[in-house]
Image (cartoon, helix red, strand yellow):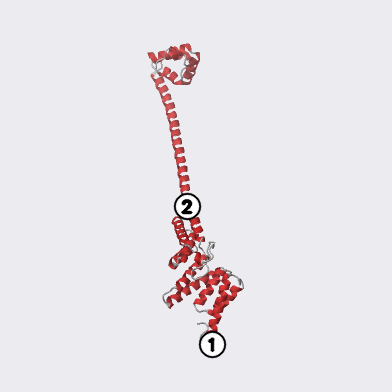
Amino acid sequence: MKYDEKDIGSCLTIDDLYCFIAGPPGGDRNSGLEAHLAHCDQCREELAEVLKLLHPETPDPSAADSPLSDAEIDQTLAMIRAVDRRERRVKEHYRWGRWLATAAAAIILIAAGAGAYWFYSYYYQPTLFFAHAKAALEECYTGKSPGDLRLDLPFRPSATSRATSNGPDLERARNGFANTLAFRNDINAHLGLAAVYLDESKFARAREQFQEVLGLSENHFQALLGRGVTHYEDGRIAPDAAQQADRFKQALADFNAAIAQQPQSLEARYNRIMALNETGRLEEALDEIGIYFSRDSSSIWAVKLKELEKNIRSAKLAEMKSGGNPDR
């Protein structure tokens, strides 16, 4: 680097001073530095301070005019290299620190993205599917089975008659519950799908859904009651008496288990009465009807049981008159 008259006005840097001290005498580079030092008191003072640091045993700054020995040059260069190595390490640490900060930020973004994906996939989207399916089911849900048993499921009956059942609504509900289950194993989605299958008289499929719930929550009351309903409905359409009796027996076992859990459940007791009647246990059915009336004597279900009670008593009276078994 050359120093012209314009450069003389610019003060020397610490690198310039080290070059002046360590470099060989003469040459354009040192001539320019010497020219500047001749006009700048401040740079001469800084040169003297540098020389004191390098040669604390040398009290006279004018010694800078003497050429450095090879050992002094080596010492100076070693010092410069040491400073350079320290600066490189600082820069390297800075680069690594910046890389680590970037990596940490990327990890945070990935984690945030994964969290957003989880929220969308396992909460928001299946929740949306379930809400639409539930709304569609409740457009035609009556709270009872095709055979007129009661269904205690977590849905609000908005239809008053089975004639109001709507095919498109059931299809939307079925698809929505199935989509929900594709994302998460949801008990209410299983119960909803079971209700759809019951309404479509697909009793085996409905029973599978209730069984899925019982696999997730042993002795789940609504699933026990629903599975009992599917056994009862299967019994009503069984091709022979043996299968019919077996299905009604299974239904009765589920209704008994449900009542053991919730003795105050009118739904479970109503269904048990119907199963007892189908299995010919008429005296027990009449006793259960009396218990039911003590808790509900005016609802539409109570009216149905009054009609059943009347039929049972008429059948028993007819059997007695004919000399047969009143408990057929």
Q: What residue type is labelled 1?
A: Lys
What label does residue 171 carry, if any?
Answer: none
State whether residue 263 appears in this view: no
Q: In this view, does 290 lie above or below 126?
A: below
Dot placed on the residue nearer the N-terminal end, 2 or 1: 2
Residue at x-position 42% and y-position 27%: 84
Most extreme residue toward the front is 163
The picture places residue 200, in percent across and down from the top left corner, at 45, 65
SS of the residue at dot 1?
Answer: helix
Q: What residue type is labelled 2?
A: Gln
Q: In this view, does 54 lie above or below 318?
A: above
| Left or right placement of residue 270 versus residue 24 in this view | right
Residue 63 versus residue 310: which sits nearer the camera?
310
**Residue of label 2:** 125
Q: How many labels does the image show?
A: 2
Residue at x-position 54% and y-position 87%: 321
The picture places residue 51, in percent across and down from the top left corner, at 47, 18
Q: Is residue 293 above or below residue 190?
A: below
- Mark 1 neighbour density, 10 Å: few (under 14) some (14–19) many (20 or more): few
What label does residue 321 carry, if any?
Answer: 1
Question: CA separation, marks 2 and 1?
Answer: 65 Å
- Mark 2 neighbour density, 10 Å: few (under 14) some (14–19) many (20 or more): some
Residue 283 versus residue 138: which sits nearer the camera?
138
The picture places residue 253, in percent across and down from the top left corner, at 50, 72
In the rendered view of the protein, which quadrant contains the N terminus? top left
Residue 95 versus residue 274: which sits nearer the camera?
274
Q: In this view, does 293 lie above or below 95?
A: below
The picture places residue 280, in percent across and down from the top left corner, at 50, 79
